[in-house]
Image (cartoon, grey):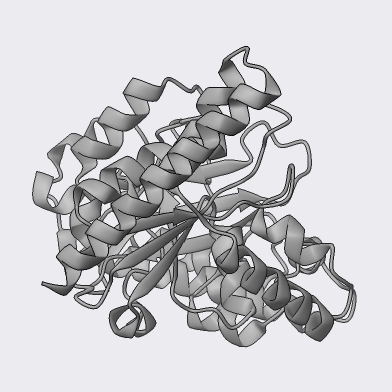
Amino acid sequence: MVNIESLSYFLTKTIDIYGEYLKESFSLMDMPPMVRYLQKRGITSQELLRKYKVGYFDTYLESSRGAKKFHELESEFSQLKPFLTQYSEARKKIPKEFIKHVPCIYGPSGNYLMQRRIVFPIYSQDGKLLNIYGKSIEPDSPSPHVYGGTNICWYNLNSEDLTTSNSLIITEGLFDAFTFLQSGIRNITALCTGRYNYNHFHEQDVSLTLRRSNIVNDFDHLTNLKTIYLCFDNDCSTHKYGSYMAVILARLLVEHHFQVKIFRLPKDKDPNSLFTEGSDNDQKRIQFFQEHFKELLDNAVDFVVEEAHLLLDRLNLSEEDRKMVYRIVENVSYYYNEVHQEEMSI
């Protein structure tokens, strides 16, 4: 018999221990590697880290109070391990209505999934655990990103800041979302893809996966929401996954009658890398990012303009023809938005 209450309790206590582990690390005299990693990424607000229950885990540091607490908890609830192990037979016994609230913390071989990772718990709008994301602090990690669960979901969806805003910013990654949060911009979420790896990119597969997940329905409680800004990586020198993902998601959002704009980040930048290049000083970084944010907001383009830009890159057109097509698309976009605004006001 699966005891859902015990699983929920164990996961809640585990996330608390991850958080205590990180809090303890900030108090050490010699700056430990996880703190150095966060500072390199510009994430330095301990208040925000605690508020969003961000943590860290390294069970092999036996001197850590966090590691000791986890081992005690693990020993007390040892019978739960099979239900929290990826691809185990035991997980098939968890009822479907509960499985999405029971992410794994162990890998297929029983290894600690969040070992040496910055850990972000992800909650639903009503505060239930949906997933756990871990980012490795190792520069050469073969698996830099891991999720405990398979479900696609949104980060920060239980924030009160989202319910009062008429706009929302969606980022590609959780560190990007946290960059906005640390800069004082709170109407922010991130697309969390679970164990679905869209880097093996096929446009139709990605579109179908997002559509089947019904993730846009998760915005139903945001009754003031009208405009959504997509701020995905501008990886134009390589695979352009960020740009294509933004357009695919935009199509889905437009079907739900949202106005969708796309931020055009500088070449090969994401929000976090843009933030960290400003300065080593926290306040200067925030000021630098806020200035860039205003510029991004002013220059945000309609998603059809971004889609045309990606399409034109594939075509062998003269510069004159490219400009002509681009002008046509911008005009179509303008009139579409005029009609959309009229519909929203009815």
Quadrant in the rendering for residue 151: top left
> How many numbered marks appear?
0
Residue 294: x and y in percent read 63, 73
Residue 289, given in percent of the width and then of the height, sits at 72, 72
Residue 117 seen in this snapshot: yes
| Vertical arrangement, residue 248 with respect to residue 340, above or below | above
Residue 217 lies, in percent from the top left, at 18, 56
Q: Nearer the viewer, residue 53 or 257?
A: 257
Q: Where 35 falls versus 170 (above or below)?
A: below
Please indicate whether residue 233 sits to the left or right of residue 153 in the image: right
> Which residue is painted at 53% across and 35% down in the image?
326
Q: Percent x, y for residue 226?
A: 28, 69
| Quadrant in which residue 21 is drawn | bottom right
Left/right placement of residue 104 relative to residue 183 reads: left
The residue that appears at 42% across and 52% down in the rendered structure is 191
Q: Is residue 73 above or below residue 209?
A: below
Q: Nearer the viewer, residue 89 or 198?
A: 198
Residue drawn at 33 percent across, 52 percent down:
335
Direction from residue 188 to residue 25 in the image, left or right? right
